[in-house]
Image (cartoon, rainbow, N blue to C red):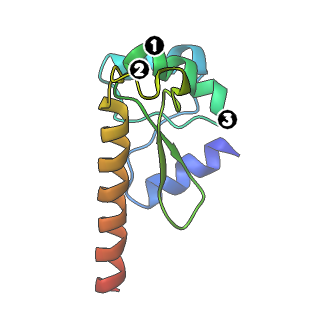
Amino acid sequence: MIAPAIEGAKREGIRADGPFPSDTVFVRARGGNYDAVVTMYHDQGQIAMKLMGFDRGVTLMGGFPFPIVTPAHGTAYDIVGKGVANVGATRAALLLGARMGAARQTARSAG
């Protein structure tokens, strides 16, 4: 299932590689080889994402007709109201969702 999806992405002009084992692809991504890593299920990517950039990681769910983005660190209920939260990942998620929504709207207007 993964290899045909990668080939389909390439036909659409998307630079895509893989499939790769999840235990090595994140090392390559951290080294600058990739702009993004697509994982097949939540926990496969979340552990690596949190280790690489807890305060800036964004989870993007695919397969929907609209962007679904969340901060990779979750809700942080344990620090609500304490004024100590780092909003970096929330900001990154909001900005990514806005960019994706704007791009979708632009594509709709053009088509």
Of tags 2 and 1, the one toward the viewer is 2
Q: CA distance from mark 3 to mark 2?
A: 18 Å
- Residue 87 lies in quadrant: top left
- Residue 100 lies in quadrant: bottom left
- Asked if residue 103 lies left or right of residue 16, the reply is left
Which residue lies at the image location 63% right of the left edge and 25% below the top edge? Answer: 44
Q: Which residue is mark 2?
A: 54
Q: Position of residue 13 (x, y in %)?
A: 37, 57
Of tags 3 and 2, the one toward the viewer is 2
Check the image and name the residue furthest to the front. 81
Q: In the rendered image, which quarter contains the C terminus?
A: bottom left
Q: CA distance from mark 2 to mark 1?
A: 6 Å
- Asked if residue 50 lies left or right of residue 91, the reply is right
Task: Identify whether 51 is placed above or below 99.
Answer: above
Q: Position of residue 30 (x, y in %)?
A: 36, 18
Label 2 close to label 1 by CB (< 8 Å):
yes
Q: Secondary structure at mark 1?
A: helix
Of tags 1 and 3, the one toward the viewer is 1
Q: Position of residue 23 (x, y in %)?
A: 58, 14
Q: Could you tell me the amino acid type at mark 3?
A: Tyr
Which residue lies at the image location 29% right of the left edge and 84% below the top edge? Answer: 110
Q: Could you tell me the amino acid type at mark 2?
A: Phe
Q: Secondary structure at mark 3?
A: loop
Given residues 65 and 6, the one toward you in this image is: 65
Q: Which mark is residue 41?
A: 3
